[in-house]
Image (cartoon, helix red, strand yellow):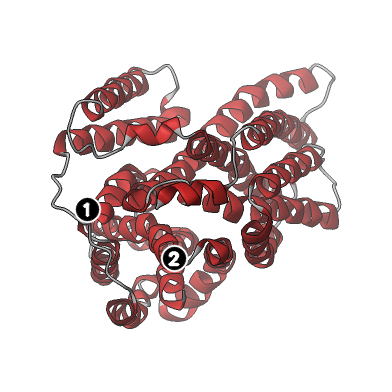
Amino acid sequence: MATLAVGTFMAPLDSSVVNIVLPQISRYFQSDLASVEWVIMSYLLVISSLLLIYGRLGDMYGHKEVYVTGFIIFTLASVLCGVAQSLPALIAFRVVQALGAGMMMAIGPAIIAATFPPGERGRALGLIGSTVAAALAFGPTIGGILSDYLGWRSVFYINLPIGIAAITASVIVLQRSVATKQQNFDFAGAGAAFLGLFFLLFALSRGQSWGWQSAGIMALLMGALVLLAAFIFVEKRVKEPMMDLTLFRNRLFTMANLTSLLNFMAQFSVVFLMPFYLERVRQLDPSTAGMLLSAGPLVILFVAPVSGYLSDRMGSRLLSSLGMGIIAAALFSLSGLGVETPYPYIALSLGAMGLGVGLFQAPNNNAVISSVPRHRLGIASGMMASMRNIGMVLGVAISGAVFQTMLPIRAASLQSQNMSGTALESLAFVDALRYSYWVAIILAVLGIFTSLVRGGSFTKAEDMRE
């Protein structure tokens, strides 16, 4: 558990700590924001597009082998990022770093499922959820301290000693889980899945800046549609497919993954828009805004292990559904934000959001990972990670599109009432924010429904695995 926790901590940490040093990187390389954001974008796009493939490779060649290989690549690429002498070189090394981080993210839950018995699996997944929450909560603080005292390159160098220790522990501690028979890798399916997901996620991430009806976005979306359709066509016909589509006949597996997608879409509407509200409307400095935003991850840190433990005792459906309900209630609370909303109200609303997420994730992940045969643990783990990343991108894209659509409409309406200046901008902002959060509430309510109708408990699914 400790060995896996280090790897689980490092991948999301490396995303959150780099966010805080982007201004320094921009100044160092004398680059504009549009260029330097690719330090983050390249990392997320590559990880998200390869998670399914890594899950399949873990099932074929062994979860330990893929996990350790990923950690080695991640650690070496971190050093290369630290020594990069140009922005294009840094972005290229971030792509390599993402290749390794994706292996760690995709395989970690599969190793947990293969190691811990059903009665302990929920608690183990809950601890992993707490580890991710800790990385997201403390990442900006760690990155700020390192960059202030040692410079921005130190956020990459710090991965070297931690990586060496974690790789050594992984080699010694983790058990091998090699497939029972020789299998062939589905290159056609893997290629179609990678390119299809890459085109889709790239279009969703660029839609707001390029324009949703622009030729580039439409071409990317059409390409993604064709490639993902080709992926399904190939998977139905090859003898040893990359993705076993028969898994989706299992209603528990399908609905739990769909609920996870809806959860992250709703959740990242808040993650994306709240910093802008705190800094533009409330005029908070980044450190103060960061302290407020940490309320959610800090609650997750303590709630996730408890919800995981409870899911081992009472099943996962009720806990996951309750978590989605609390998320919907927290979003409703956040939709009432105004230009002078008290800060304790904001912190409590974000804390309630963290409570819902903490209640939801470990039980839902437990249901997904326990609903598949042992030789499909890797692909189930990769699917979970894919739903998380696609949900994040979709949540940002949808909430951003709603916000940008409603902002000028609300500004024009307020202007007709003889309002102007800062007051108009602030009121238009909170009005547009309200519409975005209403859409997120709808997503969360849909998540309650999909969680409730997903079928039997994970314990029954576990009985079918042997």
Taking 104 as reference, is 198 above or below it? Answer: above
Taking 408 as reference, is 362 above or below it? Answer: below
Q: Amino acid at mark 2?
A: Thr
User: Of helix, strand and loop, which one carries label 2?
Assistant: helix
User: Of helix, strand and loop, which one carries label 1?
Assistant: helix
Mark with earlier residue (1, 2): 2
x%, y% of residue 334? 77, 42
Q: Is residue 49 visible?
A: yes
Q: Nearer the viewer, mark 1 or mark 2?
A: 1
Q: Is residue 47 visible?
A: no
Question: Which residue is painted at 85% across and 47% down in the image?
Answer: 341
Taking depth in this image into account, of 18 and 117 the one nearest to the observer is 117
Question: Which residue is painted at 82% across and 38% down in the image?
Answer: 336
Taking depth in this image into account, of 245 and 106 the one nearest to the observer is 245
Answer with left or right where residue 264 lies relative to residue 408. Answer: left
Number of numbered tags placed on the structure image: 2
x%, y% of residue 433? 70, 34
x%, y% of residue 152? 40, 70
Labelled disc at residue 60: 1
Taking 396 as reference, is 22 above or below it? Answer: below
Answer with left or right where residue 65 lies relative to residue 457. Answer: left
**Residue named by callout 2:** 8
Q: Amino acid at mark 1?
A: Met
Answer with left or right where residue 112 lies relative to residue 458. Answer: left
Taking 225 as reference, is 321 above or below it? Answer: below
Question: Which residue is painted at 42% across and 80% down in the image?
Answer: 150
x%, y% of residue 82? 29, 70
What is the C-alpha distance between the residues marked 1 and 2? Answer: 22 Å
Contact check, label 1 and label 2, Cβ < 8 Å: no
Labelled disc at residue 274: none
